[in-house]
Image (spheres, rainbow, N blue to C red):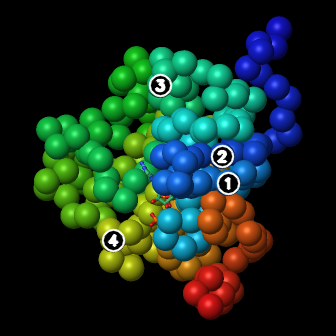
Amino acid sequence: MTSPTEVRTRSAAARAIEARKTYGEGEAAVHALAGVTVDFPEHEFTAIMGPSGSGKSTLMQCVAGLDRLTSGAAFIGDTDISKLNKTELTLLRRDRLGFIFQQYNLIPSLTARENILLPLTLAGTKADQAWFDEIVRTVGLQERLGNLPSQLSGGQQQRVAVARALVPKPDIIFADEPTGALDSRTGTEILSFMRRAVDDTGQTIVMVTHDPHAASYANRVLFLADGQIVDEMDNPTSDRVLDRMKRFEG
Ligand SMILES: Nc1ncnc2c1ncn2[C@@H]1O[C@H](COP(=O)(O)OP(=O)(O)OP(=O)(O)O)[C@@H](O)[C@H]1O
């Protein structure tokens, strides 16, 4: 039977419906999201761009259950997360979502292997060994699994974070400026790997970025301004994204 929080949606891994988020009250109110309706289709890589303060992180955080909408609804698959309590939300994030942030958020006292396996350890489940090996090989960490984060370069630490997000096979991965702290070569490697995860394993990724090059790895770019989606672009190239971003400055 379908519970009250389940509704039929098409093949969206996540979606927002009339999403509004207001900080503060009265004259001081900031409408970080001013009515956003959007689908994040399964097996696609979506980038979210827009000027500073346009609401990118707020949209991602509210769809990923890290923050609550003021009104409207956010869905992960068929689950209306605005109706979940705190514990249900924590479990949903743990069991169904993956996260990659600009700061890698690795546990300093755990090895690379333990960090990668942490979400599964917390959930009390075991890794699919073949899948773990494949991910580790693809991100090139075979020789580094026994190292602590402090013994790894920034790029290697972000590879651990990407592997940690992918190993549990989440329904969707949310990435906030995942390459923001990396040099361009390492950033490109990470983006290529994220792209391959979508193409080869059917992963779904939503990524907030300021970088037109990073956005060019996506299937589609959403452009936000003043808390609203003002444009979108399929099959983006760096140049087309850059041109579109320049129009925000005019
Ligand atoms: N906790 C908060 N309290 C008050 N205002 C907030 C809070 N978080 C965000 N805002 C405001 O909401 C708006 C949207 O912020 P958000 O961080 O989503 O933008 P962004 O597009 O991700 O920006 P950036 O590119 O600079 O990271 C901004 O005006 C911001 O100042």
Give the residue pinned by disc 2.
20
Secondary structure type for disc 2:
strand
- Where residue 192 is drawn, which disc sits there? none
Secondary structure type for disc 1:
strand
Give the residue pinned by disc 4.
182
Give the residue pinned by disc 3.
90
The residue depicted at 72 percent of the width and 51 percent of the height is 35
Callout 4 amino acid: Leu
Q: Label 2, label 4: how many angstroms apart (C-alpha)? A: 32 Å
Pair 1/4: label in front: 1
- Where residue 34 is drawn, which disc sits there? 1
The residue depicted at 61 percent of the width and 38 percent of the height is 70
Give coordinates of residue 218: x percent, y percent: 64, 67
In front of the other: 8 or 119: 8
Would you place residue 23 above or below residue 120 in this image?
below
Callout 2 amino acid: Arg
Residues packed near mark 2 inside 10 Å, few (<14), some (14 to 19) or many (20 plus): many
